[in-house]
Image (cartoon, helix red, strand yellow):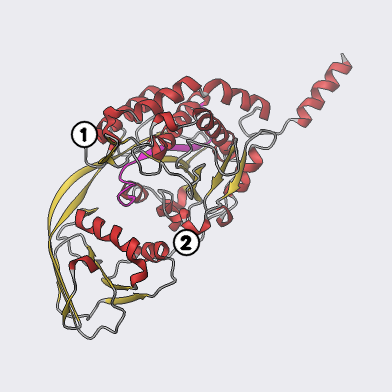
Amino acid sequence: MKIKLYAALAALAIAPSLGFGQDAVGFTKNVDKLIKADDVERIIKTLSADDMQGRGTFTPGIDKAATFIEGEFKQAGLKPLAGNTGFRQSFSMVQTKPVSAKVTLNGADVPADNLAITASASFSWASADGVEVVKIPAGKNFASEYQSLMASDKKTLVLLDTSYSSFFKRLVARAKRGGTSFSKAGDKADNAKVFVMGALDDVKSLAVNYEVKSQEKPLFNVAGMIPGKSKPDEYVVFSGHYDHLGIVKPMNGDSIANGADDDASGTTAVISLAKFFKKLNNNERTLVFVAFTAEEIGGFGSQYFSKQLDADKVTAMFNIEMIGKDSKFGPNTAFITGFERSDFGTILQKNVEGTEFKFFPDPYVKENLFYRSDNATLARLGVPAHSISTDQIDTDKLYHQVTDEFSSLDVKNIIATIKAIALGSRSIVAGKDTPTRVAKLDR
């Protein structure tokens, strides 16, 4: 009897405490038992099916996807967020289409092909007074410069070197399609951006006339929660975006951008994790599960969501973005954006030690991914909000293509990553670990 007792005590001493009142082996068994491969496959197949029409913003397809996600949350036993009667977190956006645009710079009319304007309403500038003038010479990182400009609330004239012509063509095409912004009473284009390519001279005179037609349209995140037991006012968010590009220019007869990896894979992870933690039902912190809308057109779903809660009460955010294939580090790996900005990644890696899975820092630092996904708004507010991905973004030929379909995915990779996130998050969910805050970013 003594030998058996000593053996049992030794086993308990070796097994790490995980805060759920069970050891690592037990938690891993729960992960394997409760996260079902066939259910994961069913969810992602449904979200990326042709009848979802690519889940484009403002389309019947995205409404159908939202209805499906609502059903999954209801079946899982989640509760709506405080103040909501259902799982849809509804809000309105204003969609604008340009009618006319004319810019006169230093006495000369700017050709239409050299001009791109983004604004939420019609406006006129009679001079450069009150307008910030930004020059972007050759050799800059245009993507980074563009993100900084669009984050600014100032009226801005942007003068671009001709070396950015390939980027500028895309900017012109986007400007012609119009834009989307939050609806506000008496909308004014106080943050309008006017891009002119090929002119870096000093601005001596400026006149701009821009006219748009506007239409208010509804959008909705889908969100549910599991209240925390001992720390209900501390939130852990699991998120992914469920929108994609919708119907696009045909390629080999196919015009549906299914978005299987981007980001049906991440949304599937959110749903699967919601089911897992609800079945465990022993989370000390409140868990919020949200599928964001309108990520592809500007991250509006996550921006709205971030205004509905106190960022200081959000302990961590697990934003899951494209986990459909092996990462550049090989099978059973994923990377975390902004790894160095908090100890979030270190905690996750500690919690998966002893398994085959490993989390790595983001290898694509030049892409500025930390501020390019739905984690960005809360990260700017100081939340350790990070995106988890396996996408090989520098070589991914299916990104934003009609070929991003279910058949292109490695479902085993998706399941492995979901399980790793469940394991990696457990001490945060249990209220044992609190990631350090991210430095707030002034906008």
What residue is shown with label 2?
Answer: 440
Residue 218 x/y as whole percent: 20, 43
Left or right of 104? Residue 40 is right
* x and y percentages locating residue 12 in the rendered image: 76, 27
The correct choice, above or below, for 358 with respect to 406 in the image is below
Q: Which residue reaches farthest front?
A: 252
Check the image and report above or below for 31 versus 327.
Answer: above
What x and y, as percent, mark residue 211? 12, 63
Please tell me whether residue 296 belongs to the stretch shown in magenta: yes
Is 125 on the left-hand or right-hand side of 356? Answer: left
Q: Is residue 89 magenta?
A: no
Q: Are marks 2 and 1 in contact (CB under 8 Å)?
A: no
Q: In x, y percent, where is residue 204?
A: 23, 86
The structure residue drawn at horizontal position 51% and vertical position 61%, both measured from the top left corner, is 439
Badge 2, how many Cα within 10 Å: few under 14, some, many 20+? few
Residue 316 appears in the picture as rendered: no
On screen, residue 38 versus residue 290, left or right, reads right
Q: Work out which quarter of the rendered image holds the C terminus and state it.
A: bottom left
* Amino acid at circle 2: Lys
Q: For the N terminus, which image quadrant?
A: top right
- 291 or 295: which is nearer to us? 295
Tell me the CA gap for discs 2 and 1.
37 Å
Give the number of the mark in front: 2 or 1: 1
In the image, what residue occupies the spot 56% across and 31% down?
416
Residue at image mark 1? 60
Q: Which residues are magenta?
A: 281-299
Tell me the SS state at disc 2: loop
The total of numbered circles placed on residues is: 2
- Which numbered circle lies on residue 105? none
